[in-house]
Image (cartoon, grey):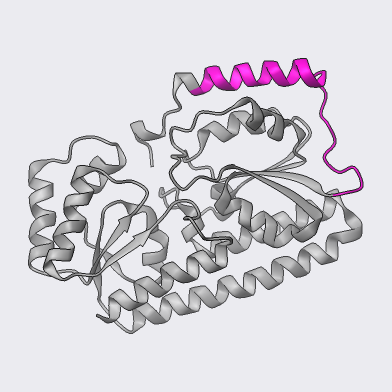
Amino acid sequence: MSSTRHLPRLTALISASAALALVLAGCGGGNTAGDDGGRIDVVASTDVWGSVLSAVGGDQVRVTSIIHDPGADPHSYETTPQDAISAQKAQLTLANGGGYDDFFTKLADQAANAKKLVAYDIGATGDENEHVWYSFATVEKVADQVAVELGQLRPADAQTFTANANTFKAKVADLETKTEQAGAASPGAKVLATEPVAHYLLETAKVTDATPKEFSEAVEQESDVPAAALAEVQNIIAAKQVKAVVNNAQTVTPVTQQVVDGAKQAGLPVVNVTETLPAGATDYISWMTSEVDSLAGALKS
């Protein structure tokens, strides 16, 4: 979605430029080959996509996730000289795209000879929502494309990459089935979301997001929520017109906290979702399984 939140900061541009200058001075401006007979250097914008790279590449890849802190915001992330060095060495980069991680486009451009993948483009959902790691179909397509690109970089291991991708996709397919079953167990269910992060997850479960559009847009744009929209949200919660509140635990504002507190007071379940791997999560499958189980439990209540 387009919003002021997605515009890169001037400071980020300055940092990236300074980082590039440092890299060129220290490395002679050439592209350092990441595949020296050891592992292939791959770089992702966030640890969500980094975990997909790891699942497909296995021990044949060296994965660097630029954002790996649960508290970091990809929309306003400011790059560092070390980020630039990692990107400059990369043979394969994986961005989310869709306006979500614009900072990474500039980093990936520094890896002149790297293969560049963009999940949003690969998935091509036709939806403006950029949180495509919640689209299981997109994640599966990305895994396939990663296997293809890694296989071209290291043909001797192409079959291994394909096998790894197939194993990973089977687990993603199981998640998709579990999500569909969770929704089917509560037909016609509605939820309210503090932010439309889990849009594709709810779509898979055939759960209706009943959040007023004005509320969602204001939160996404980091602008003041209209009083009428907030009142409508509060009424929906108080009247228990939804089964649960889906909360982006990584974007906390006084308004979203008010919504979460209201849900708890009304006895509605709160399903926390995140944009990057939360503390303690090590891979996409375990993280997403936890979120799907949480949604399923809320819909049963």
Residue at the limit of the structure toward the bottom, as seen here: 185
Quarter of the figure with the N terminus: top left
Q: Answer above or below: position of 235 versus 231.
A: below
Along the viewing direction, whichever of 22 and 179 lies nearer the viewer: 22
Q: Residue at 55%, 59% (x, y): give it.
A: 138
Q: Answer above or below: position of 24 versus 168.
A: above
77 relative to 83 in the view: left or right: left
Q: Quadrant of residue 60?
A: bottom right
3 relative to 8 in the view: left or right: left
62 relative to 98 in the view: left or right: right
Q: Is residue 31 magenta?
A: yes
Please state the horizontal and vertical placement of residue 235, each as a whole percent of the image.
Answer: 7, 59
Q: Quadrant of residue 269?
A: bottom left
Q: Quadrant of residue 171?
A: bottom right
Please state the horizontal and vertical placement of residue 44, each as a whole percent of the image.
Answer: 63, 45
Magenta-highlighted residues:
12-38
Q: Residue at 79%, 58% (x, y): give it.
A: 59
Q: Residue at 35%, 35% (x, y): give it.
A: 3
Along the viewing direction, whichever of 158 and 237 lies nearer the viewer: 237
256 relative to 95 in the view: left or right: left
Q: Answer above or below: position of 222 versus 18.
A: below
Q: Residue at 17%, 65% (x, y): give it.
A: 264
Q: Is residue 28 magenta?
A: yes
Please state the horizontal and vertical placement of residue 99, each as a whole percent of the image.
Answer: 47, 38
Please state the horizontal and vertical placement of residue 208, each as a whole percent of the image.
Answer: 27, 67
